[in-house]
Image: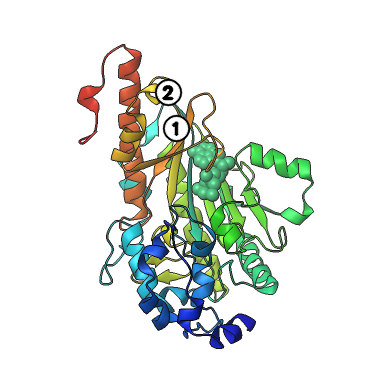
């Protein structure tokens, strides 16, 4: 690997990034001393410390700046990953452990929202195929293997989960745009993390989408992660979306196991993805919710944050709300189970609807505000 060779001709000190003015988390943790320690390490795939910190060198903003290039990156460069994970996830020490998965929808309390506020619900997670590099380092053949393994497993899905795979390469521009407009399909990623780690190489080779007939169960292949598993539907039934999500995920896992393959799952960190912010459950449970009144309240953003929720626009990350419809989801991915995150969303959304109806009745919401707001 050329990158290893040239790194070996220079000392860590000579090659240390210039982080003057950089605000990213890596810059805060990667001292010269730590860089020297990690400098000569290589994973079995030849991944270097430079490979995993590249986003931190190309963006001065308040980002994480770290991306794993293979499963081993998390341990080979453990000192750096642990420090960044600890900060990003609000305290997660080297001896802390993410809980075991819990996909039991029957234990949810509430979650079938009726009425006008919730337009649609969606639950997604990221999964990675053990044995293959993450997008920053995978080669074309490996990316095609990631696609092949999943497409083979998906053939075995039964009942209302069964569907068809549509590779991006076989799609017309109009078909692709229609799927994007309906919120089913990803666009070529343009975020800094993907760009600075060259993760969108060879686009659209080996990328595609599977969906069942009703388009309520979908798998994205080789977007930001090897796999994104998505359950979604119109209306407000978060429970049913989680039930289908869990059933689909477990069926796929079983079908992959039969073929001798498995997802990357760390005993300590949970499910592993390229971005350290997505480890643990990788789960984002979101609703599209219309809040004509509350969104104009001066404390709207503070309320969302205090409820441990996150806000995006109607078209997803980096978009704006249209007609006061917001994408509201759990903010964290680690330290709680899948079911707990879905419950957190249900509880938060219940409060938001209560505030909206109170404002509609012309009453103040002071007594409903979460503590600290
Ligand atoms: P993620 O990273 O979780 O996949 P993005 O913010 O990248 O989410 O959005 C991906 C797509 O999913 C976008 O088209 C977005 O509008 C859509 N989406 C997200 N949540 C919902 C929801 N609750 N209902 C309908 N579409 C949604
Ligand atoms: Mg996204």
Q: Give the side of residue 329 with respect to residue 303, left or right.
A: right
Q: Residues within 10 Å of mark 2 (few under 14, many from 20)?
A: few
154 up-or-down from 11: above or below:
above
Residue 266 at x, y percent in the picture:
39, 71
Ligand 1 within 8 Å, label 2 CB: no
Name which quarter of the figure residue 115 lies in: top left
Q: Residue furthest top?
A: 362
Task: Give the position of the N terminus as an image quadrant.
Answer: bottom right
- Location of residue 367 by image quarter: top left
Question: In whole angstroms, how far apart are the C-alphas of marks 1 and 2?
Answer: 8 Å
Residue 247, disc: none
Tell me if residue 61 comes above or below residue 52 in the rendering.
above
- Looking at the rendered image, the quarter that the C terminus falls into is top left
For residue 110, say whether it is visible: no
- Of residue 153 and residue 229, the one placed in the foreground of this image is 229
Tell me the SS state at disc 1. Answer: strand
Q: Position of residue 99 (x, y in %)?
A: 30, 62
At label 1, counting other C-alpha atoms closer than 10 Å, the crowd grade (few under 14, some 14-19, many 20 or more) is: many
Reading the image, the residue beneath label 1 is 236
Numbered label attached to residue 115: 2
Asked whether the residues under the numbered discs 1 and 2 touch, taking CB atoms below 8 Å apart as contact, a structural biologist would say: yes
Which residue is pictured at 40% across the width and 25% down the height? 295
What is the total number of numbered labels drawn onto the structure image?
Answer: 2
Asked whether the viewer can see residue 203, the reply is yes
Q: Earlier in the sequence, mark 1 or mark 2?
A: 2
Point 28% across, 63% down: residue: 92
Q: Of helix, strand and loop, which one carries label 2?
A: loop
Q: Position of residue 88 (x, y in %)?
A: 35, 58
Drawn side of residue 363 relative to residue 158, left or right: left
The residue at 65%/41% (across/down) is 180
Q: How is the image coloured?
A: rainbow
């Amino acid at each position: 690997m050329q990158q290893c060779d040239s790194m070996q001709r220079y000392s860590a000190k000579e090659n240390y990034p210039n982080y003057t003015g950089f605000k990213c988390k890596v810059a805060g943790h990667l001292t010269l001393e730590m860089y020297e320690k990690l400098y000569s390490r290589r994973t079995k795939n030849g991944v270097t410390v430079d490979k995993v910190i590249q986003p931190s060198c190309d963006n001065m903003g308040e980002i994480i700046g770290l991306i794993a290039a293979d499963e081993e990156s998390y341990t080979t460069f453990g000192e750096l990953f642990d420090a960044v994970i600890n900060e990003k996830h609000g305290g997660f020490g080297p001896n802390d452990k993410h809980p075991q998965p819990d996909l039991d929808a029957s234990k949810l309390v509430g979650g079938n929202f009726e009425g006008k506020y919730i337009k649609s619900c969606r639950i997604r997670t990221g999964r990675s195929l053990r044995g293959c590099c993450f997008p920053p380092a995978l080669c074309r053949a490996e990316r095609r293997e990631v696609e092949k393994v999943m497409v083979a497993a998906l053939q075995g899905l039964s009942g209302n989960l069964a569907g068809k795979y549509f590779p991006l390469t076989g799609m017309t521009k109009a078909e692709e745009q229609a799927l994007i407009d309906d919120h089913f399909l990803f666009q070529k990623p343009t975020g800094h993390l993907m760009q600075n780690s060259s993760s969108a190489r060879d686009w659209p080779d080996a990328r595609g989408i599977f969906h069942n007939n009703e388009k309520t169960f979908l798998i994205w292949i080789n977007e930001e992660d090897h796999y994104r598993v998505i359950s979604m539907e119109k209306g407000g039934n978060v429970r049913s979306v989680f039930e289908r999500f869990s059933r689909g995920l477990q069926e796929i896992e079983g079908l992959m196991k039969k073929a001798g393959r498995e997802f990357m799952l760390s005993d300590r960190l949970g499910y592993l993805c390229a971005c350290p912010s997505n480890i643990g459950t990788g789960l984002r449970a979101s609703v599209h919710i219309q809040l004509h009144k509350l969104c104009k309240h001066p404390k709207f953003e503070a309320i969302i944050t205090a409820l441990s929720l996150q806000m995006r626009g109607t078209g997803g990350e980096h978009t704006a709300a249209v007609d006061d419809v917001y994408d509201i989801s759990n903010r964290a991915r680690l330290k709680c189970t899948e079911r707990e995150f879905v419950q957190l969303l249900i509880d938060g959304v219940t409060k938001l609807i209560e505030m909206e109806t109170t404002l509609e009745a012309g009453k103040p919401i002071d007594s409903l505000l979460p503590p600290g707001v």
